[in-house]
Amino acid sequence: MGMISSIRKRLWIVTVLMALALLGFIVMDMTSGGSSSLIGNPDTVGSVAGEELSWREFQQTERVLYNNADVDYFGRKDYLWNQFIEKVILDKEAVHNGTGVSEAELQELQFGYNLSPVIQRNFRDPNTGQVNREQLNFFKQGLEDESLDPQYRDFWLVQQKQVIQDRMNAKLSNLVSRSLYMPNFMIERNQYESNLRLDFAYGLVSYNVINEEDVVIEESDYEAMRKEKEASIQTKEETRTVKLAVLDIIPSAEDSASLRDAVAAKTEAFKTATDDSSFVVSNLGTWEDAYKSAFELTPTIQEIAFLAPVGDVLGPYVDEGEFRITKILDRKPLPDSVRASHILVRVQTREQYLAAVSLLDSLRNLVETGQGRFDSLAMKFSQDPGSAIKGGDLGFTTPGKMVKPFNDAIFFQMKEGDLKMVLTQFGVHLILLNEAAYSSNTMGVHLATIGETIIPGDEVTNGLFDFAQTIIQENRTLDALEQALSKDGRYSLQVVGNLFENTYQVNQFGAFANNTVREIVRWAYLKNTQVGDVSPEVYDLQEETKKFTNKYVIVGLSEIVPKGIASIEPFRNQLKSEILKRKRFEKIKERIGEVRELGLVLGEYTVGSIDTSFDTSPYSGYINNLGEEIRVVSSLVKLEEGQTSQPLMGEKGVLVCKLLRKQIPGPPSNLDAFRAFFVHPAKNVAMNYLMPSLKEQYRIKDYRSKFF
């Protein structure tokens, strides 16, 4: 009893501790980023003008549109995010401008004669290029009698939203577009600028006459250039700048030798194989029926493939990161063009395929036994209306113009008079080769190749990972990491800037490293990640084709850049290039001095030649034999005929120009005709900015990084 009494007296302590523990869980939940139950709806992926965007609806839409589709994971989410935002904006704009989509209009857009572009895209028959009305009617009937499979119904409901959104967008665009007007003074200016023509002579002094080492660039130069270009490089969101080192995993000599030996060991079996296609496929090679000309082969075997005996095996040799061996199967002249006819039976199911094969086999027997003419049978049975009316005749064609199975059959597997059945994406074809023209005497060789990718072994891969892990564990600040890498001498840090919270691609890694990029960006945006921190994780990149790990990446946070402020770091190389050009220009300009007349000698420099650019438009700024120089050509408009310019800063060097002729266009005789010419592209440009400008007007909150 004494113990129970003691516990009861201290029960308040237990209650307080439990409350504190519960509060701790709540605070942790609020700050974890995975949920925000006390500060907002945890299902909200974002909001537009206070209207929340549901994560569940986002996922459902993605599932319906991209079910089992091999589409970029982050790219499709980015596309859907913009679709969700634009839908809300269009709905809100519709309230102001009085637009909408009625039930009757929606019915017409989905099933009528004025189909929505969304329906036209989704129901276009790839074989005919026309809308598949049979498939569209299947959906219509299923919706009316409620017999449509739930999966198809979900697809239609998502598509219906897209149809409405597309129509609303078109109506808003038309409202804005039709309100745009180009006054006469703009028409006259555009007509003058686009038709003005200049003839001039020029001499060029290359920037290379000034060595880069002789140009001193100071930090103040970067700051001045940053301020000058701030409008073009500023950001509307907070960004991160990271410094990273990429550690290439390079196979050792032992790795390469063992792979070469493994491939070489298959040479004899390959040479004696009686079923080459089965041997190639069983050894994970790629079999194709095509013959290749010399220029289509890798230089390593380009010559020997046409000299070695048929049946010989070449290699091992290295090509595209693999040790390969190649068997010469056959050689023969290749036709430059062929004329073929075909009978096509379209198929979509296995049953249709079997029926088509049976039908075409019967037709082939009729032709081969002389009981039927190919052209007559094609007119009766072929489902390719374009050629059926001509007896199946496709006319002459050159290599590569037909789909690959059809192309390989008529150019590599058949001779004149042959009949062959081929399956393509369009259906089953019975092909007759009518004629083959040989004029260039091009020889082709049929090859079969197997190989092994030269990949690093576990010892190299694990050793480099251990090195990377050790160096980031021992150097927890960016400064320390940079010093350690400089001592090692093999690696250096490179700057990657302008990383937004939802960035999923960086140029340095290519298009197949999105997951790695997202991991790096998520770490950089963690609340406890500070400038100067080094990520505790070693990231990996994969080879794009074979999908093995070929690089490790170590990362540190270099900058947190507030929105609206352009940081120097991400643009340092870009700014350096412009600063270097300007400083070289000033030095060259000073050494040229004042120019009175264009000649081969310009101050301290002798130019190689005086070139002439005729009929040059300041509108395009293109100089004959030199390229685009808009800044230079525009400055020549101010000169009078016969006048020589002072040194001008070009893209490739310093130019001195003499204006020979200025062809000034007369006033336009018909302003309305020119208005029609200029207004259309001007409206297109304006419409490209319509939705981005609306997005700036609405309050958009983005919580995507919580979810992916």
Image (cartoon, grey):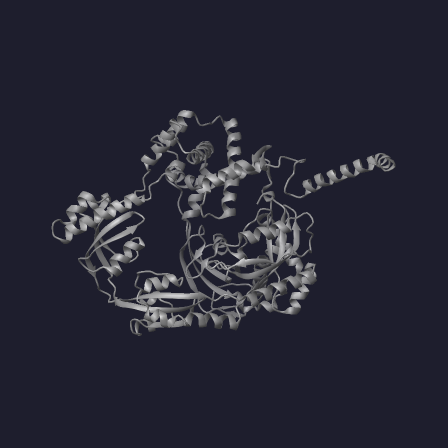
Residue at coordinates 29% horizontally, 74% vertically from top-left?
A: 309
Nearer the observer, 379 or 458: 458
Q: Is residue 383 left or right of residue 70?
A: left
Q: Residue at x 30, y 42 (%)?
A: 128
Left or right, 705 with respect to 9, comes to left
Residue closest to the eye, 420 or 302: 420
Where residue 487 sits, quadrant-wise, is bottom right
Q: State left or right for residue 71 relative to residue 403.
A: right
- The spot of residue 566 in percent (x, y) is 62, 50
Residue 390 visible, this angle? no
Q: Nearer the viewer, residue 339 or 184?
A: 339
**How far across and down, in percent of the image, does residue 168 sit?**
46, 32
Name, please, the residue furthest toward the front.
Answer: 1
Residue 316 spot, x, y in % from top left: 41, 72
Asked if 567 appears above or below 586 in the picture, the reply is above
**Total of numbered circles in the picture?**
0
Residue found at the very far left of the displayed protein:
371
Image-based side of 377 in relation to 573, left or right: left
Question: Can the viewer see residue 669?
Answer: yes
Please state the horizontal and vertical placement of residue 610, each as a whole percent of the image: 44, 65
Image quarter (top left, top right, bottom left or bottom right) of the C terminus = top right
- In the picture shown, does residue 650 fall above or below 331? above
Quarter in which the N terminus is drawn: top right
